[in-house]
Image: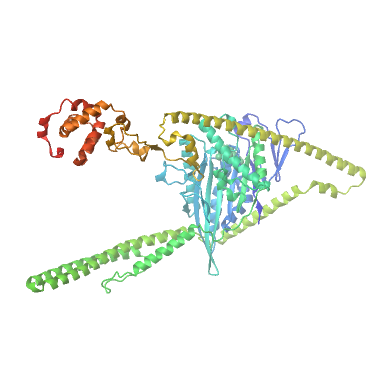
Amino acid sequence: MAENVKVIVRCRPMNHSELTLNSKVVVKMKDCMVEIYDPNERGSALPKQFTFDSVYNQDSNTEIIYNDICYPLIESVLEGYNSTIFVYGQTGCGKSYSMEGDKSSDPPEKGIISRAFEHIFEAISVATQTKYLALVSYLEIYNEQIRDLLQPHEKLGQENKLNLKEMPNEGLQIPGLTQEPVHNVHECERYFQYGTKNRMIGATLMNQNSSRSHSIFTISIEQISHIDDKENIRKGKLNLVDLAGSERQAKTGATGDRLKEATKINLSLSALGNVISALVDGKAKHIPYRDSKLTRLLQDSLGGNTRTLMIACISPASRNYMETLSTLRYANRAKNISNKPRVNEDPKDTMLRQYQEEIEKLKKMLESRLSTPLKIDDDKHDDDDDDDDLPSKNNNRESDLDTERDRLITEYEQEMRKLKNLHEHERTEKENILKQIDVIKHEYQKKIELLQMSKGDSVNKEEILKRIAMLKASLIGGEKADDLELSDKRKRKKLASERRLSAIAHVLAKIEMNEDREILQNQYKDISQELNSKTEALRKYRLKVKSLEKEICDIQGEFETERQDYLDTIRKQEMTTQLLSQISEKIVGTLKKECNYSNLEAIKEQAVWLDDCQKYRLPEMIVHRTKLPPAGQNHNRISSSNSETSIKNWSAPNSPPNFDGNDIVGNYFKPKRATELLNQSLRMDTNHVFNTWRDFARNNKPTSSVSQSFQQRSPKKFNNYLVSSENYLKKPLRLKALPNIDKTRKDHLGPLDVV
Ligand code: ADP
Ligand code: MG
């Protein structure tokens, strides 16, 4: 059945600075209505009125709010529904106060989150015939990036960016997000504190303010019960969302990182607003959930299968009038969103099912292990399946197995000795006996191996049983099933919350009753009374029309301001884009034509937007090497690579020098005269030139890698490398080689120097 998103408004008391600045109270609350007065209007101007599912003034506490509105929502999570509670409003208006409470106040004020933990575990403890698995996760969205706040200690400080992934049949998932099983309130609190601390540390490290990020704490409750021997699995999920401050950021003249942050917050909250508008519109064919991470994550909560509650937090002070009005308008739109909550029956993605399957698999493994022929002497070893006193049994078994193995080894050795003696004495039967030895050796080895294996098995068995026990311990429920008082207390609370809800519904119905009908249904004594009454009504309507006209003007004004804000942001972003494109153009100018990044247009076309990662996948940087036409007879021997080489490989520091290709341009334009002279000397005596080169290399030791790589080459290819290495050590070789061809050095050739 469809039901609307519930929206309540909570107004905090005046804070210290508002009191010292003598700010006026511009908010009034009564029944389910909020009235807000424009501090700039004087006289009898009508206040703006908004009706919500419930409103809570400065004096109300979180306990009342929880019992009135949150209680039924958490109950439905325990029945297998999804529920979301999100707090919205200007920074400093009580979002975190409502969600997390205030430990510094006296007495400490518990927030909705702590109350929900208590509620859930109380309900689980008195449940009968149902087992539960509770899992928690905690994430933060900052600058459109998702951070895992329950990241384990060992991973802290590592890159913490998660992506959203749409999984077939399972919907939206966040691969890699930590999900921890919890057994009681204390564990939940610990994880929540851990995540909150993590959020603060992250915020400090990144020089950000945690109120600039959105956080989502999720507790999912999976339950298994057996009805008429049929297994029934359900999964309810509770999302507790603390949104970033709703105040407009661009107004503050932010630049750089701050602007980026501001636009991203606005992007998320605007996207949330647009989703709300589109959902309420009724005519909209497209709901822009994909416009931000926040709306993608809250997709089920807005127009989906979730029961949703929005708590709009406001300040009563005149100096926050504009922000308060904007929050009220935002919340007023949200209350018209219609959801279709349904119980998640037999969902595919439960951990419970995974745990069950694992337990079954482990049990089967155990059974198969136990059926292996472990025993050699059936009389001595009794394989007991009783799991409770497993460690001592295992130890006994282990020592038994050791003795058995030793016994077998000794037996084997004795047998060997006997056989060897026999072998000595009956040489003629040598072959047969050797065969026998082989057979017996093989058999004994097999037995020993089996024993070793069974020893390993017993350790595995222990591990398997431990794992089964751990998995079974994750299931909770029914610990206080006999506590009748607690069960009664729960029933009373449930009943009270139902009564309160119906009272709220009654008040709302009364407000919504058409005033026209009141006038029409009124009985008048005479015509003058009717005239007076209707004149009064007319006066009221005139005022209402006037206030509605003003409201239209206000909304148009607000829309215009917002438009200006966006235009400002667009302008600033355009300037940043322009700067980046100018810089890249300058850089592109320095790139060689052979590099694919020299053609930015082509790169732009090849770039692919990755929705999941929210970034582009750019083509790899490639340098195309062009083969130049031969410019002289000598160059026929210079081979050049035509293949495409990644720039990374190209500049790899450990790669051996490429004698053939690297100096292609140098070779191409090398003075012809020098080449001719060299060739001449080559023709004269190749060995002499080589010796000279070797001499030079010894004296000058260019680089170890060069000489090594040279020495490693096959001597057969000497001629080729002579030219190539000459290219590498071009100048010194020419200068030294030509006047000093020394024949006497031939006598001193080492083994490596043989040509
Ligand atoms: P937000 O999370 O919206 O930025 P906070 O929850 O941190 O704002 O509240 C700002 C300050 O106002 C805190 O010091 C908090 O204790 C106080 N505050 C907020 N709401 C209330 C309330 N209803 N009653 C008393 N103090 C409140
Ligand atoms: Mg906060």
Its colouring scheme is rainbow
- Tell which of 331 and 557 is nearer to you: 557
- Tell which of 204 and 144 is nearer to you: 144
Classify residue 75 by image quadrant.
Answer: bottom right
Residue 38 at x, y = what percent? Answer: 71, 33
Residue 79 at x, y = what percent? Answer: 58, 58
- Asked if one can make out residue 406 in the rendered structure from this viewpoint, the answer is yes
Whether residue 455 is situated above or below residue 513 in the rendered picture: below
Whether residue 308 is situated above or below residue 443 in the rendered picture: above
- Tell me what residue is drawn at x 78 percent, y 48 percent: 514
Residue 284 at x, y = what percent? Answer: 66, 47
The quadrant the N terminus occupies is bottom right
Ligand 1 located in image quadrant: top right
- Asked if one can make out residue 426 in the rendered structure from this viewpoint, the answer is no
- Tell which of 105 and 185 is nearer to you: 185
Query: In the shown orientation, is residue 91 left or right of residue 191?
Result: right
Whether residue 264 is situated above or below residue 520 in the rendered picture: above
Query: In the shown orientation, is residue 41 left or right of residue 497?
Result: right
Classify residue 275 by image quadrant.
Answer: top right
- Tell which of 76 and 372 is nearer to you: 372
Residue 579 at x, y = what percent? Answer: 51, 29
Classify residue 589 by image quadrant.
Answer: top left
Residue extending farthest to the front is: 633
The quadrant the C terminus occupies is top left
- Tell me what residue is drawn at x 53 percent, y 34 percent: 260
